Image (cartoon, helix red, strand yellow):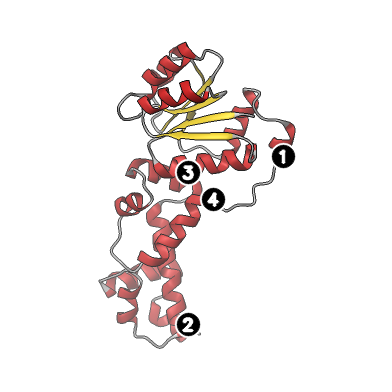
Amino acid sequence: MIKVLIAEDEPLSLQNLTGHLRRLLGADALIEGASNGREAVDMARRIRPQLVLMDIEMPVMTGLDAAAIIHEALPETHIVFLTAFDRFDYAVGAMRAGGADYLLKPFDSAQINACLQKLGLLTEKQEHREERSENPFCAQFSVWLANHYMQDISLEEAAEAMGMSSFYFSRFFRTAYNRTFLEYLTSYRIERAEELLRQTDIPVREIAPRVGYTDANYFTKVFKRHCGCTPTDYRSRL
């Protein structure tokens, strides 16, 4: 039975990694999580994992310090570092602390799979296991956005709702949706406006606040930029 420890203080990142590894490695794998460096050291000593996925920026004790202790106590354990910061000193520190690999956030499933293959922890059967579940981040964000798009929301508020820092949320979002948060939010709002224009006779000035725009004139400008015509013209063409 393969045993994996994920040391990650971002709740959603921990959830995503756990979910992916569970689908990949199967129900028999032991997958544990730690939210700070000290907890990671204690848990590693207890379960003796074959693999530790270690965030470098960790509270209580840094990932580098925790990894050095784990590497000394469990030299056969593979340690893979995770970080959102592309810094050379982090890469050097990771290797000195006994790191077997180094993944820069946000990473995708293919990178995780390739890492496990490199370490010899992925069987051919596991490699070809189908992932039938929807991306947990996209599923959670879709529900949140559907309930908040009509409000004056910001990237910072969205990040907090997802349990992420603004920096990590921004990078993770770009990877998941191939566009920025603002680009996605604007498109989403305009699509909702189009639905209201098609399906109701609500005046344009009242549609604007229903899709998150307090200024009707600004809403008209954004709509025209995306659709090539004003909301009034859009409705008249139906």
- Quarter of the figure with residue 189: bottom left
- Using a 10 Å C-alpha cutoff, classify the residue at mark 2 as few (fewer than 14 neighbours), some (14 to 19) or many (20 or more): some
- Quarter of the figure with residue 151: bottom left
Quickly name the residue at label 2: 198
Tell me which numbered mark, 2 or 1, is placed earlier along the sequence: 1
Tell me which numbered mark, 3 or 2, is placed earlier along the sequence: 3
- List x then y, in percent, for residue 173: 44, 48
- Using a 10 Å C-alpha cutoff, classify the residue at mark 4 as few (fewer than 14 neighbours), some (14 to 19) or many (20 or more): few
What residue appears at the point 35 percent right and 65 percent down from the top-left corner? Answer: 148
Residue 146 seen in the figure = yes
Q: Are marks 4 and 1 in contact (CB under 8 Å)?
A: no
Q: Does dot 1 land on a helix, a strand or a loop?
A: loop
Quickly name the residue at label 1: 128
Which residue ends up furthest to the left in the rendered image?
A: 215
Quickly name the residue at label 4: 135
Name the amino acid type tagged 1: His
Q: Does dot 2 land on a helix, a strand or a loop?
A: helix
Relative to residue 138, is residue 28 drawn left or right? right
Give the spatial CA distance, label 4 vs label 3.
11 Å
Give the spatial CA distance, label 3 vs label 2.
39 Å
- List x then y, in percent, for residue 8: 42, 34
